[in-house]
Image (tube, rainbow, N blue to C red):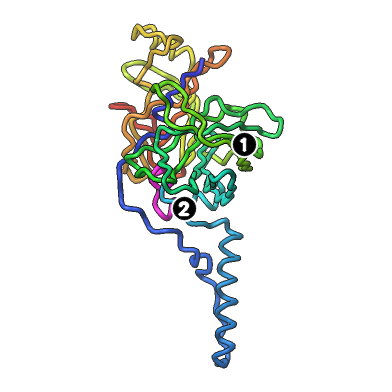
């Protein structure tokens, strides 16, 4: 059984100053500049225009783009991290916009790895008097080109009024947890069909305010991960637990424990994992880099966790609140214990 904790997948983050955007000119660093004879002013204007075009073309070829400020807040990423995620295709610009029935929906960008998926949209009403609140919702359908659904769970919402004031435009987010069979490169066809108002009851569904057709195509793909094959026994919470492997990306990680050891701990603690109980001794509290610094993550609650079909392994997938440098992680902190790679 897989347990999904939606509150922890893309948790709320504190307000902070927006960081500077990607420096697209950096793609030209280190290039040799040839000396040339002085040219007439008119020619310099032409050359300057050509250089601007070259910079734009080179940056586009490298996949560089300016991250949206909302995505920066969700992933707490600085400029260098944004550049890295963009270059390895974990972050991609979408820039698709569709207008219908007085509503314009713009797909802005996606951020994803082999475990997580995040898509950011903006919904804007042509009527400036319409106030889109956090309790509004969107109806949509999704198709993956006839392929089997790769998500073990999905969620979506307009962002809170703490993060964006009420107006005729609002950010809308879709996020998902991918399953273990999500290695293929797929095209996600999203078809929005309605904007709904606030529900009369908290758990209810709001009235359809606008019906229409807004279609988008997003890339869904896996990403490279840093894998550590361990097969070692560690002391966790007073119990000996064999850790089979740890796999990390900048956005998430997967830990595979020995299933029999987890069952022993489960019995000793008097909990029932199949009934949604937890063994927090198996939850990392931070990651440690090679130089001894820690990422300041805090207690990490799994996105999914559960035994393999034969019970021999216990898989746990967790997301990072802040993007980490996966290649530099050398240990997981487990309260007073630790898992060294």
Name the foreground residue: 247 vs 275: 275
- Quick check: 61 above or below 309? below
Q: Nearer the viewer, residue 237 or 199?
A: 199
Q: Is residue 77 magenta?
A: yes
Is 11 located above or below residue 127 in the figure?
above
Q: Is residue 14 visible?
A: yes
Q: Position of residue 300 (x, y in %)?
A: 37, 29
Q: Nearer the viewer, residue 96 or 124?
A: 124
User: Disc 2 versus disc 1: distance between alpha carbons?
Assistant: 24 Å
Residue 216, by quadrant, is top right
One can see residue 328 in this view: no
Residue range in magenta is: 71-83
- The residue at which mark 2 appears reads as 67
Question: What residue appears at the point 55 percent right and 76 percent down from the top-left corner?
Answer: 32
Q: Secondary structure at mark 1?
A: strand
Residue 114: percent from left, percent from top: 55, 35
Residue 164 on the magenta span: no
Residue 11 as seen in the image, left or right of residue 114? left
Q: Looking at the magenta stretch, what is its main secondary structure?
A: helix
Q: Please give the residue where the numbered disc 1 appears in the rendered image.
A: 191
Please, is residue 298 above or below residue 234 in the view?
A: below
In this image, 188 relative to 153: left or right?
Answer: right
Which residue is at the front of the view, 24 or 14?
14
């Amino acid at each position: 059984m897989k347990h999904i904790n939606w509150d922890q997948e893309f948790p709320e983050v504190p307000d902070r100053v927006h960081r500077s955007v990607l420096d697209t000119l950096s793609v030209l660093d280190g290039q040799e500049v040839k000396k040339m004879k002085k040219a007439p002013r008119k020619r310099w204007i032409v050359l300057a225009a050509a250089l601007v075009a070259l910079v734009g073309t080179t940056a586009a070829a490298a996949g560089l783009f300016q991250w949206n400020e909302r995505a920066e807040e969700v992933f707490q990423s600085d400029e260098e991290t944004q550049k890295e995620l963009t270059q390895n295709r974990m972050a991609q610009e979408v820039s698709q916009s569709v207008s219908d029935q007085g509503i314009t929906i713009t797909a802005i960008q996606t951020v994803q790895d082999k475990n997580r998926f995040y898509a950011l949209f903006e919904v804007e009403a042509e009527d400036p008097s319409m106030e889109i609140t956090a309790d509004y919702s969107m109806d949509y359908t999704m198709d993956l080109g006839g392929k089997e659904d790769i998500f073990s769970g999905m969620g979506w919402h307009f962002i809170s009024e703490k993060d964006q004031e009420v107006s005729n435009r609002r950010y809308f987010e879709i996020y998902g947890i991918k399953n273990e069979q999500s290695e293929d490169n797929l095209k996600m066809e999203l078809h929005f069909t309605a904007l709904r108002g606030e529900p009369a009851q908290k758990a209810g569904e709001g009235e359809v305010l606008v019906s229409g057709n807004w279609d988008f195509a997003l890339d869904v793909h896996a990403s490279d991960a840093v894998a550590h094959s361990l097969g070692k026994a560690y002391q966790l919470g007073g119990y000996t637990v064999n850790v089979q492997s740890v796999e990390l990306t900048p956005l998430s990680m997967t830990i595979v424990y020995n299933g029999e050891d987890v069952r022993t701990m489960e019995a000793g603690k008097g909990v029932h994992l199949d009934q949604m109980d937890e063994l927090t001794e198996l939850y990392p509290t931070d990651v440690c880099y090679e130089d001894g610094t820690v990422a300041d993550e805090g207690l990490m609650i799994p996105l999914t966790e559960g035994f393999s079909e034969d019970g021999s392994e216990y898989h746990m997938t967790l997301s990072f609140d802040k993007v980490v440098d996966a290649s530099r992680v050398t240990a997981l902190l487990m309260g007073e214990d630790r898992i060294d790679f």
